[in-house]
Amino acid sequence: MINSEVVSSKKEEEKKKDSSKIYFFIIAIAALLATNIYFYVKFKTNGEKVYTLTVEKENLQVQIDRIEAELDKIDVENVQLTPEMSVQKDDSRAEIAELRKKLENKSITAKDIDEAQHKINQLKKQVDTYRVNVQRLIQENQILSKQNSNLSESVVEKEKQITSLVTSNSDLKEKVATASALKVSSISINGLEVKKNGKEFVEERAKKIDKLKINFTIADNPLAKSGERDIYVRIIDPQGNLVVQGDNIFYVHGEKLQYTFKHNILFTNKGEDYIVYWAADEGFSKGAYTVLLYEDNAIMGRSTVVLR
C-alpha cells in the first residue's frame, strides 16, 4: 500500500516537471516573437520616416521654386522700385537662398521641416505684399506718365529721358532673359533593371538597378526661343555628395558649378516630354538620389527618387 502511494507521488512530480518545461518553452518562444516584432516595427518605422522627410523636403523645394518664379515675373514689369521695396525684394531673395541651403542639409529633422514650412508661408505673404505694392507703383507711374505728356519738356530733360530709357532697356533685357528661362512643368525619376534580352523594367531595389530614367516636360514659354538647348544635370547621391565625372563646369549667375553630365535637346515650345538616362559607375546605393536640371544660367526643376 505504501509503495503504491510512493509511485503515485513520483508520477505526479514528473507531470509537474513536464508541465514546467512546456510553460518555459512557451514563454521563451513568446519572448522571441515579441523581440522580432519590435525590431521589425522599429526598422520599418525608421524607413518610413526617412521617406516622409525626403518627400516633404521635395515639396518645400517646389514651393520655394514657385516663390522665386513669382519674384522673377514681377521683375519683368520693369518698374523703378522705391528704396524700401528694393530692400524687401533683396531680403526675400536672401531668405530663399538661406532656405535652400538648410534643405540641402542631409541631417535635417522633422522639426527643421516644420520651421522651413513656417518660413515659406511667411515668404508667400511677403511676396504677395510686394506684388501689390508693385502694381500700385505701376498705376502711379501711369498717372504720372499721362500728366507728363501734357507738359512741355526742355531739350536737357529729353536727353535725360533718353539716357534713362537706354538704362531701362538694358535692365529689361536682363529681366526678359530671366523670364525666358525654361522651366520644368513635371519630372519623374525611375530606377531601371535591364535584362539580358535588352528589355527594361522599373525597379526600386538599389542592387538590381542598372540606370536611372529621368522623364521631364518643359512648360511652354512665349518668351523662350525654340531650338537646340544644353541641359545640365546635377545628381546628389544618398550621402549628399555631388556625383562628378571629370572637370564638368558651367555657370549660373556668374558662379561656377560642377555638373554630372549634360544632354542636348531640341526645344519646340510645345510642352514636349524628354527622357535622359544615367548609370552610376560603381552601382547604386540605398537612399535618396536628387536630380537637378539647369539650362541657360538658371535651374529648370528638381526631383528625388528613393531606392530600397
Image (cartoon, rainbow, N blue to C red):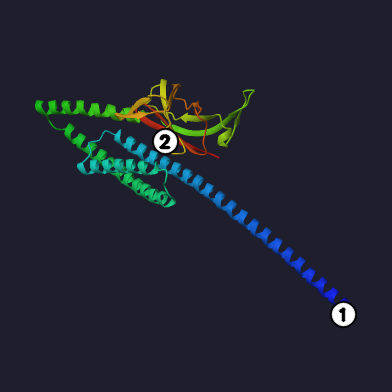
Residue 2: % across, % down: 87, 80
Residue 96: % across, % down: 33, 42
In front of the other: 152 or 275: 275
- State the image quarter where residue 195 is shown: top right
Name the residue tied to disc 2. Answer: 241
Name the residue tied to disc 1. Answer: 2
Residue 162: % across, % down: 17, 25
Kind of residue at badge 2:
Asn
- Please give the name of the residue rendered at 53% of the width and 47% of the height, measured from the top-left corner: 47
Closest to the camera, between mark 1 and mark 2, is: 1
**Image quarter hosting the N terminus:** bottom right
CA neighbours of label 2 inside 10 A, class few (<14), some (14 to 19), many (20+): few
- State the image quarter where residue 161 is shown: top left
Q: Left of 138 or right of it: where is 300?
A: right
Residue placed farthest to the bottom in the image?
1
Above or below, comparing residue 278 to residue 55 in the picture: above
Q: Left of 263 or right of it: where is 250?
A: left
In front of the other: 283 or 80: 283
In front of the other: 294 or 20: 20
Residue 155: % across, % down: 10, 25
**Image quarter hosting the C terminus:** top right
In front of the other: 50 or 222: 50
Q: CA distance from mark 1 to mark 2?
A: 85 Å
Above or below, comparing residue 30 to residue 305 in the picture: below
